[in-house]
Image: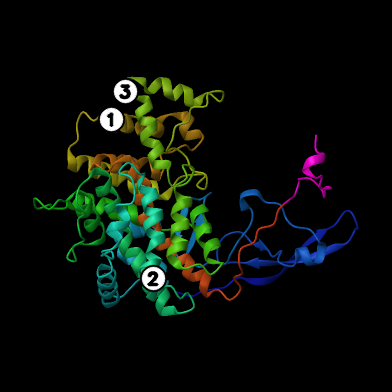
Amino acid sequence: MKDKSANPSTDTFTLTDNRSGKSYELPILKGTLGPDVIDIRKLYAETKCFTYDPGFTSTGSCESKITFIDGEKGILLYRGYPIDVLAEQSDFMEVCYLLLYGELPTPGQKKKFEKDITYHTMLHEQLIYFFRGFRRDTHPMAVMCGVTGALSAFYHDSTDITDPHHRMVASYRLIAKMPTIAAMAYKFSIGQPFMYPRNELGYAENFLYMMFGNPCEEYKVNPVQAKALDRILILHADHEQNASTSTVRLAGSSGANPFACIAAGIASLWGPAHGGANEAVLKMLTEIGDKKNIPEFIKRAKDKKDPFRLMGFGHRVYKNFDPRARVLEKTCHEVLDELGIEDEPLLDIAVELERIALEDEYFISKKLYPNVDFYSGIIFKAMGIPTSLFTVLFAVARTVGWVAQWNEMIEDPTQKIGRPRQLFTGAVERKYTPLHTRK
């Protein structure tokens, strides 16, 4: 793969200060894809002004070669490969290698990578006592945050971020152990014994085994379910500079150890506006309650004065269609057909909602198509994964993206500790009044 770093073009952006009449020439950087970028690194030094961009939605915070999104055209590329091609023809371990190293692995490289990941899936045995410190009704994401952050207390041989080998070992450990932590969080919440990972199983298979297996009887993983989960993991592996990824980079910019950085990413992902979207889909379906109530809720969704919103339709980034949803639509129906689920009210409602959204002129005109969260929520529900685990599985998938982005940031010679500025609108300097004189 040919890499091309962003370089100043011959073009510049002229900024004129209307207060003084002075003009400033700002370099324009060109990437390989996407819009040009105005380089404002010297803006404050030259103008004594900051830019104001709440949410940083118009600000490029870093240079990256990992993931590209074009929301208008519905494009998502991992290292240049279209997401639908990877989801249909690849598997999660191969995609992990691609995100980490920038190239698809050879057969030998893939075999070694899978072996290395597999032999890091066990957790330090003392971490079992850490789990016992949580209440049984603790949300699994709280457990994920705590246990992931605690890994730095057990694996001191992979916390030196200046050592490439340490970074590689930490990256492998995080990818490998996340499904184990997730499954243990679930088992602990229902009072069942932990299931240890099995080296002969694949990544998605191992998670399903640890989730649904028990020591009393043999558990065979359904291959259709395992393939569906593998695709979901691929589709959620990375998504450019989203809130949780930016959080990982910001935490990492201070020199924090990788386990702490990923724990920070998990905390950010926990928010309902980010990783909790597929959980919100199930809550919406529960609110609708019955297929006969769908017309009423469709009417409410079209009413601008009604606060009700159909969750799982449309996307903040993808203004046309979500390319991940097209892959998962097919997978969703494969899982439903395989499991032969009948008379499941929430799934019946979901299927009917999907039909309406794909045929109703209102949804079509506004491009409110079912997104990846809509389909993943249905799949998880059909597979028997509890709603509280939906965001946890998102974290399992996104860990490789976080790790790849973190590594890229550490290796970037231009990276600095994150320090956003502010538009201060508080009080100016005030005179302190002693307590006894205040009235």
Main SS class of the magenta portion in the image: loop
Q: Quadrant of residue 205?
A: bottom left
- 20 or 165: nearer the viewer: 165
Identify the image quadrant of the C terminus.
Answer: top right
Neighbourhood count class around disc 1 (C-alpha, 10 Å): few under 14, some 14–19, many 20 upward = some
| Depicted 390 relative to depicted 364: above or below | below
Image location (x, y in percent) of residue 265:
46, 56
Q: Residue at x 31, y 54 (%)?
A: 131
Please give the label number shown on residue 170: 2
Amino acid marked by disc 2: Ala
| Depicted 345 relative to depicted 395: above or below | above
Which residue is under mark 1?
Answer: 348
Magenta-colored span: 423-439
The CA span between labels 3 and 2 is 47 Å
- Secondary structure beneath dot 1 equals helix
- Secondary structure beneath dot 2 equals helix
Q: Residue at x 19, y 35 (%)?
A: 341
Q: Quadrant of residue 376?
A: top left
